[in-house]
Amino acid sequence: MVGLSCCAVISIGMALAASWGLSSAFGEVFSPLHAMIPFLLIGLGVDDAFILVTGYQRALAAGNTWEKSVELAMRTGGMSILITSLTDFLAFLIGSATNIPALSSFCVFAGIGVLFDFLFQITFFMACMVLNARRAEARRKDVLVCLKDQDDGFESYRTPARGFGCLKCGWFTMDLGEPIFLKFSQLLMTWPASVVTIISFLALIGLSSYGINQIETNFRADWFLPPDSYLLDAIDVGNDYFTMTTLFNVYIRDIDYFSRQGELNSIGSFLTSSREVLEGSSDYWFTAYLAWAALNSPYSGVYSSVTNTITDETLFYEGLSTFVNTNGTRYQQNIQFRNASNPAQGINAARSSAQIGATEFSGTGQDRFDAMQNLRDDLAAAMTYDDARAWTQSFIFWERFGFIREELVKNIGIALAVMTSIVFFLIVTLPIVSCVIVAIGATVLDVFGMAFYWGVQINFVVAIFLLIAVGLSVDYSAHIGHAFKEARGTAKERVVEALRSNGPPVFNAIFSTFLSILILANSQTYIFEIFFQMFTLTTLIGGFHGIVVLPVLLSFVGGENHLPLTHSARTLRLEKTKSGEAGILKQGSKKEAA
């Protein structure tokens, strides 16, 4: 089993290499956020490996040859991981069309990784499983295959899960998963447990809905700095003892500056009276130029104090050129003449500056976006929007707060729609599909909402982790739904069978994913803090919906299934008869006949 486990890890590594290589070849940009993709592929890949190995173990334990067991594992487990991989791939593929570049690039990397993880699982990993089965059949020890077991009564290598390394530990041959989940499923099907589950399910949705309405959008660049950073200390001193401001520029295009002096005056009023501009923070070249022209001949002769304009076009441009080369030299870089030696040809562009109180390190993201939008609205009232623009580098980050929530909801909605289509196409049965989609949707909603109570705020980092939550939640629910579809009997009997067969690998995937992120619990870096919080919520809430809520929902609406068994199931039954379980099978045959 150690060797096969290493093969599973290698297949995940191959998928990661294919993802990074192909995405880079397509011109996608790699960012620090893409460092989370290995964790995503580990979560999905380990889950797929557990499903395939569990299917093989069950078939082998029923008395089938190892060749037939591999076939049955691919027939059942392969279809199960196809459902999850295809839905994840398409969800990420559609998510790549988002307007957020970082999120789009992440979806491309993740989508390609999911696709190749599936391909390597059904090719490379299954080939490794065949080799491992041959090794077990030849009674060769795990890892140290050069050695053979000489104990004729020892059969720990009958399945890939038996034995550990070269040790003969009898308790390793115990299969605790199925008995535990058999008891758990029987308990879950009692009416008190079902009632408690539904109440807990609805209460969690209520709390999460409130959290979604209250959660804020925010992101600060200093969150990426370590606690002992020099820059962080400087930012703290500035916030604690000084008024922090943001300098912005107003850019004016190549308009007819002479004929639009009235609007230039309006921009001066905007810079002194806007609700966002700090008082006394502006230094406007046009206001300074008119004040100079009113006092200097010959420009004073064409200056109108009534309209606060210069009435002669030639003297307007000539005077402006003279001003910026004498008293107004500080404005030289703010005015770009078409021809410096002939100012009458006009101006290509001009700019002015002022300060606003909103900063990168104050308030919430929505506060900063609102300040930026108010500034734009006030400027648009002074001059046509296309001809005057307010800009500062911080606006690049503030802009995203205006649409990230809507963009996130849209992408999650599209992903769920795609998943609904794929799950329905592969499972077909509408009640089962409906329950699976409810479980997936509730997982995403609850992860989103419960993040609020953990102090998480919406930004592009959180958006990426929410899309990962969508992908992982599919794995936690779709496997149970597919197993329920294949099971026979009443709704409750089918739930018990689905949990008994697929509950252990799903739980193993959840537990292994949680263990892999537990080392990040004390991380001081923002990305890894958010990663730990979101993945913890995803594994716990996704597991709750997949192996607790979904089975209860299926017991209510999943319905009975007494159709003839599939070929694979019949084979298992016949092989069990040969292996000495005739009594149990006869009882099952009576039920079928009835």
Image (cartoon, grey):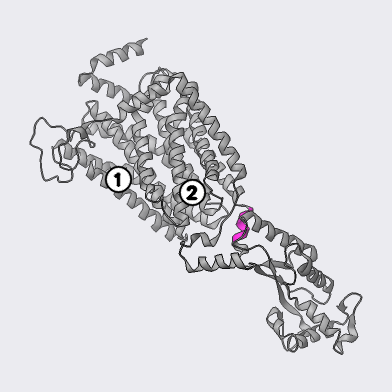
Task: Residue under label 2, please give it.
Answer: 465
Indicate whether 277 appears above or below 557: below
Q: Which mark is residue 234?
A: none
For residue 119, above or below residue 317 = above
Residue at 80% in and 72% down: 264
The N terminus is located in which quarter? top left
Q: Is residue 376 at least partly visible in the picture?
A: yes
Query: What residue is shown at x 40% (from left), y 57% (from top)?
Result: 20
Q: Position of residue 380 (x, y in %)?
A: 76, 63
Q: Using residue 174 as the reference point, say whether residue 545 is left or right of it.
A: right
Crowdedness near tag 2: few (<14), some (14–19) or many (≥20) residues, C-alpha within 10 Å: many
Q: In front here: 512 or 310?
A: 512
Magenta highlight: main SS:
helix
Q: Which residues are magenta?
A: 397-402
Q: Earlier in the sequence, mark 2 or mark 1?
A: 1
Task: Confirm whether the magenta stretch covers residue 400.
Answer: yes
Residue under circle 1? 8
- Residue density around tag 1, few if under 14, some if 14–19, many if 20 or more, within 10 Å: many
Query: Is residue 572 located in the magenta-colored stretch of the structure?
Result: no
